[in-house]
């Protein structure tokens, strides 16, 4: 029920917050909301268009005469929803990276030197968010790392200004 009501709740929250903001703050919040929604939708589309079919094909590859996969509609839908949520959230990574650097919470050089730790962190998070197989972990981890690099690129452009 909360999911059905969430657009109405978000709209009312937006109208409440909007009334207390200056015009430049409104533009900034709008851009963040659009980028967040766009990246989330891109993550869901990437998941359902590319990754989910690959995972199902990978699962079906274990089929043999003695081993027959049994997929229930409920299990497939649940897996698709959870993976879509995981991909949508992980695709927020460039915004998080950019925001942390822009707010001077973390310095650009520090993040650049911490790349190996970021890779390990991304792979651990991908392992926690996906089914227990290396294929799905890499399918989530590699695009997330590329998005991390995109966030660093955006932060570097901001830093030069």
Image: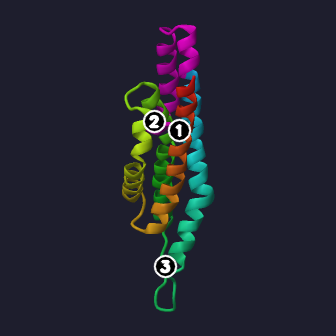
The label number, if any, that marks residue 151 in the structure image: 1
Q: Earlier in the sequence, mark 1 or mark 2?
A: 2
Q: Earlier in the sequence, mark 1 or mark 3?
A: 3
Badge 2, how many Cα within 10 Å: few under 14, some, many 20+?
Answer: some
132 within the magenta span:
no
| Closer to us: 149 or 57 | 149
Residue at 57%, 11% (x, y): give it.
24
Q: Which residue is mark 3?
A: 69
Counting from the top left corner in percent of width and height, residue 19 is at 51, 9
Counting from the top left corner in percent of width and height, residue 112 is at 45, 42
Give the vertical position of 17 relative to 103 (above or below): above
The Cα–Cα distance between marks 1 and 3, rounded to whole angstroms, is 40 Å
Residue at 42%, 40% (x, y): give it.
111
Bounds of the magenta span?
A: 1-29
The N terminus lies in which quarter of the figure? top left
10 within the magenta span:
yes
Q: Earlier in the sequence, mark 3 or mark 2?
A: 3
Residue at 56%, 47% (x, y): give it.
43
Element class at badge 3: loop
Give the residue at the far right of this rendering.
49
Q: Which residue is mark 2?
A: 96
Please tell me whether the stretch drawn in magenta is mainly helix, strand or loop: helix
Element class at badge 2: helix
Element class at badge 1: helix
């Amino acid at each position: 029920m909360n999911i059905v009501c969430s657009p109405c709740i978000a709209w009312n929250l937006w109208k409440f917050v909007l009334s207390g903001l200056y015009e430049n703050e409104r533009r900034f919040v709008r851009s963040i909301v659009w980028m967040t929604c766009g990246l989330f939708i891109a993550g869901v589309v990437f998941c359902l268009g590319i990754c989910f079919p690959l995972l199902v094909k990978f699962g079906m590859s274990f089929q043999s005469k003695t081993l027959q996969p049994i997929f229930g509609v409920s299990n497939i839908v649940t897996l698709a929803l959870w993976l879509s949520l995981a991909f949508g959230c992980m695709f927020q990574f460039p915004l998080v990276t950019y925001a942390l650097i822009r707010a001077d919470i973390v310095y650009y050089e520090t993040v650049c030197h911490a790349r190996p730790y970021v890779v390990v962190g991304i792979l651990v998070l991908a392992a926690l968010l996906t089914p227990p197989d290396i294929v799905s972990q890499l399918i989530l981890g590699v695009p997330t790392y590329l998005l991390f690099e995109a966030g660093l690129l955006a932060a570097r452009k901001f830093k030069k200004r």
